Image (cartoon, rainbow, N blue to C red):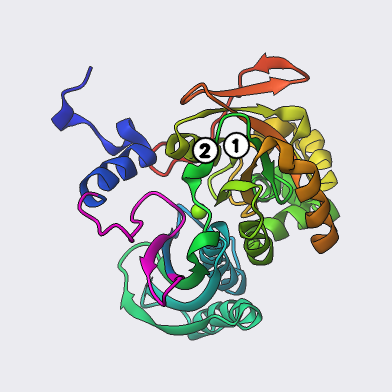
Amino acid sequence: MKNKDHLKLSDVGEFGFIARLARIFNQHLPKDVTGIGDDCAVLPWKGSQKLLVTTDLLLDGVHFLKEKISPRDLGYKALAVNLSDIAAMGGRPLWAFLSIALPVETELSWSKQFLSGWKSLSRKTQVGLLGGDTTRTTRAMVINVAILGEAQQIYIKYRSAARPGDLVAVTGQLGSSEGGLRLLLNKESKESSGRDEEFLLRHHFRPQPHLKEGYFLAHQPEVGAMMDISDGLDSDLRRIMESSACGAEVYLEKLPVSPALQRCSQKYGWSLEEVAAAGGEDYCLLITIGSEGYPDLDRRYRQKFRRRLHLVGRITGKKGKLVYLKDGRRVILQKSGFDHFKS
Ligand SMILES: [Mg+2]
């Protein structure tokens, strides 16, 4: 056992670190303020309307590889991943702040394209840019985005609302972004790049925040907890388990995957289940549903979005235990979701 003073970030992990921050800063908060620990902070605003605030940082070499992503896609993605956190609470995005640290040798055309990618999504979602900061960096490029949004207090969905017996569902296919990332890092894929590869890369470069889905689901009484999938189902379901003091089981054969991911997994020898369960950056929504409520909710959801809500598991009373089942038999997953302080 290590002496406490010698513990490193890699020993406690990203989520252990966040838990420490929450312990310090969530004390003595006013009653109507939700601080660290969910997709957004929630603050009092206009009567029953609450203000949502989220911020996310993207670092060259960790969250993206500048040489491998076009500035246009990067601008789009920087905004998209932040909007996804507003979707996760069931809110509407309002305003954005962008801070960026660039090496001085960055070409002006790069920043122009970055902003044009950003603008294509900010126009679509009507999120105006109000400010931020710019500075030079001597090393990696850093992009930080903060978004303000709003939501009716009674419709905000938190991670802490899962209950044993609830079903677990996702609003989109899993693993496509991870497939795209693997292709980016994998040399052999370049020679045999085709439609499937393009599909996966597009998912990696241009994630679609599920704002309409999040807003709709927030208004459905059957939905308990909600969050977005940024670090992977494995990692993010554990966040819901922690906040709700429960456990979960996941049915691997039910994870929704795209045909493109299935074919590429075969072609490149990836474990499809591992990619789907642990791959990050899908930016669809992860929800829990009162067990009786699923058929009716799924019907209303299909009517509205012409797509299904995919059932992938169940919440259990076994606190802290995440179990994977395949056709009813327990399996051990090789890789778990993304943690910024572990490699
Ligand atoms: Mg999130």
Residue 234: image quadrant is top right
Which residue is found at the position 33% from the left and 79% from the top? 133
x and y percentages locating residue 227 in the rendered image: 55, 50
Q: Residue at x 77, y 52 (%)?
A: 197
Q: Is residue 343 visible?
A: no
The range drawn in magenta is: 27-50
Would you identify the image quadrant in which residue 288 lies? top right
Give the mark, 1 or 2, whose residue is nearer the N terminus: 2
Find out whether the residues at labels 1 and 2 contact each other: C-beta distance under 8 Å.
Answer: yes
Q: Nearer the viewer, residue 281 or 161?
A: 161
Q: Amino acid at mark 1?
A: Ala
Residue in the image at 65% along x and 17% along y: 331
Label 1 secondary element? helix
Give the residue at the far top of this rendering. 329
Question: Label 1: how many residues lie within 10 Å, few (<14), some (14-19) or many (20+)?
Answer: many
Check residue 278 in the rendering and tell me which mark sits there, or answer none. 1
Q: Look at the magenta stretch and give its main secondary structure.
A: loop
- Determine the residue positioned at 46% across, 77% down: 96
Identify the residue position indicated by label 2 in the image: 235
Rounded to the nearest angstrom, the CA distance separating label 1 from label 2 is 7 Å
Disc 2 CB within 8 Å of nearest ligand 1 atom: no
Q: Is residue 289 magenta?
A: no
On screen, residue 321 above or below 153: above
Crowd rating for badge 2 (residues with CA inside 10 Å; few <14, some 14–19, many 20+): many
Residue 204 position by quadrant: bottom right
